[in-house]
Amino acid sequence: ASDVYKRQEVDMEMQMSNAYKEGYFELQRGDVLLAAKKFNEAELLFPQSPWAAKSAIMAAYAYYTQDYYGDTIFELERYLVTYPNHKDKVYAHFLLGMVFYEQIVDEKKDLKSILDSKEQFEIIIRDYPSTEFAMDAKFKIDLINEILAAKEMYIARYYLKKTKWIPALNRFKTVVKDYNTTIYTEEALHRLVEINYRLGLINESKKYASTLGYNYQSSDWYKNSYKVFNKDYRDGVKELQKDKKKKIGLIKRFKGLFE
């Protein structure tokens, strides 16, 4: 009976291997739907095999290459639940981050995509700091923070224009506290000096003035760095758009999964 079982197992492994190879062949040929189907088939044929988890990620990757974002998210979330301890989880988190990242079209509306993307890249930096994905994740987070800071500044300026001092104050504080590595910090600090002074909070105003002077030892912002905000606001998205479609490089990153 044990010989029969072994033969069956070998047979299943062979079928799985064939399905995986077919999936890989179709992926390279560009038929991503058939490729994903074959990878799913490989996983189902022999779920206890170490190749099952790889097949699940490859199905997701196949969908991702042609922007089937909903299917990619479904496959990746299923993989993370089904194989919680799998060694290649970093791939899944990175791919999930990229899927959300590539769906950011307008930061005024797409806050959920922005935050979901940031969460995945933060997981990589926290849990996989020594992988090749960590540096790219850090770069993506820097871009995302610029966009989030731009959003705060946009709203803060609106309140400023409407002379709603307290809501404006709170938004500028958020920029200084949460996005202090972005290009908006200097302006936000200046605004905090300005608003606190206007409200008669002289000590608060001095505190921010001293931070501004210490970190930006010139009055450049005040003199000539006043930016047309909406232009900057759109530039943040342009940068992101430029960075979004670099899918070719990812095939190299996923090479380890193919072998």
Image (tube, rainbow, N blue to C red):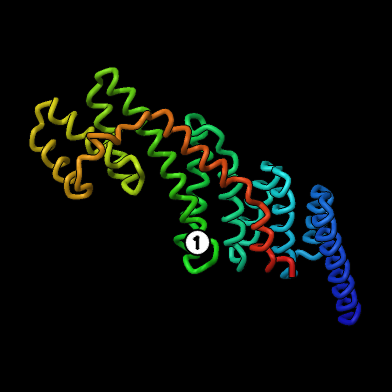
Give the camera-side residue of 193 and 69. 193
Residue occupied by mark 1: 134
Q: Would you say 52 lies left or right of 196 here?
A: right
**Going by the picture, which residue comes out furthest to the bottom?**
3
- At horizontal 34% and vertical 49% (from top left) the residue drawn is 181
What's the residue type where badge 1 is placed?
A: Ala
**Going by the picture, which residue comes out furthest to the top?**
162
Question: Residue 160 location in percent, x, y?
Answer: 27, 23
User: Local crowd at mark 1 within 10 Å, few (<14), some, or many (≥20)?
Assistant: many
Q: Quadrant of the N terminus?
A: bottom right
Q: Is residue 169 above or below residue 75?
A: above
* Element class at badge 1: helix
Question: Residue 188 location in percent, x, y?
Answer: 27, 37
- At horizontal 56% and vertical 50% (from top left) the residue drawn is 97
- At horizontal 59% and vertical 62% (from top left) the residue drawn is 89
Q: Quadrant of the C terminus?
A: bottom right
- At horizontal 80% and vertical 65% (from top left) the residue drawn is 46
Question: Residue 58 location in percent, x, y?
Answer: 72, 58
Q: How many marks?
A: 1
Give the camera-side residue of 154 and 33. 154
Q: Quadrant of residue 208?
A: top left
Q: Would you say 34 lies left or right of 177 here?
A: right
Question: Residue 114 location in percent, x, y?
Answer: 50, 41
Q: Would you say 127 lies left or right of 247 here?
A: left
Q: Is residue 46 above or below residue 111?
A: below
Give the camera-side residue of 67 and 72. 67
Q: Is residue 69 above or below residue 192?
A: below
